[in-house]
Amino acid sequence: MRLVLIAMFLLIGNVNAQSGVMVKNEQEVHLKRSSILVSDLEKSLEVYRDVLGFKVASIVESEKESYAYQVFRIPKEANIRVATLNSSDQNRIINLKEVTGISLPKPTSAPYMSTVLIKVNDLHTVMKKIKHLGLELTEEHTVKGTRLSYKEQSFVDPDGHLVALYEILNK
């Protein structure tokens, strides 16, 4: 079974002084970050850092006692290296967890089980770069609403994770 924690990132409200994270109320549900298992960290950074624009906050080796081994059901003989990524307005928003020493499963057919949704400012330019990397793309889709219009398009990253991008056309 493929274990990947990917989610849409919605954080609103005030900055919590202790954690530096945007939260409206300490009692509310709060999404801290997504963790994505990858087989080749450098290849994944080409997508998430170089094309999508996330900034690398840190890259560290996980200890064998890390909770990641248990929660992702990774055997202890494997090694985990973690790149923590920031966006322009959120710290530690994504962890790319490179797992080496074992083979990670890739989806062999649809439907995809999850996606991450990321806002970009120039969908056409970003998707040209994604296409240049040889990744699988969907067709662009435009939604014209009375309050909001946007275009969206998805791609599959090097490890088979579905990533949906959108660009707001009007506010």
Image (spheres, rainbow, N blue to C red):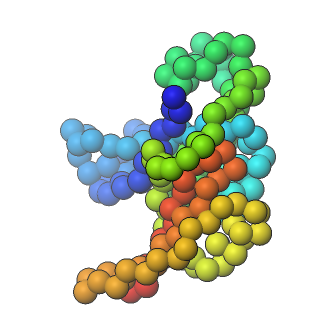
Eyeballing the image, is 39 above or below 111?
above
Figure label count? 0
The answer, for residue 28, to whether it is visible in the render is yes
Residue at 40 percent across and 39 percent down: it is 18
Eyeballing the image, is 114 above or below 69?
below
Q: Quadrant of the C terminus?
A: bottom left
Residue at 32 percent across and 49 percent down: it is 23
Taking the image as shown, residue 148 lies to the left or right of residue 112, namely left
Residue at 66 percent across and 45 percent down: it is 159
Q: Residue 79 location, x and y as percent?
A: 72, 22
Tell which residue pokes out farthest to the front in this image: 109
Residue at 61 percent across and 56 percent down: it is 156
Q: Quadrant of residue 69?
A: top right
Q: Residue 34 location, x and y as percent?
A: 49, 43
Q: Residue 163 location, x and y as percent?
A: 54, 57
**Front-most of residues 114 and 90:** 114
Taking the image as shown, residue 141 lies to the left or right of residue 24, namely right
Eyeballing the image, is 133 above or below 149?
above
**Front-most of residues 115 and 8:** 115
Q: Quadrant of residue 48?
A: bottom right
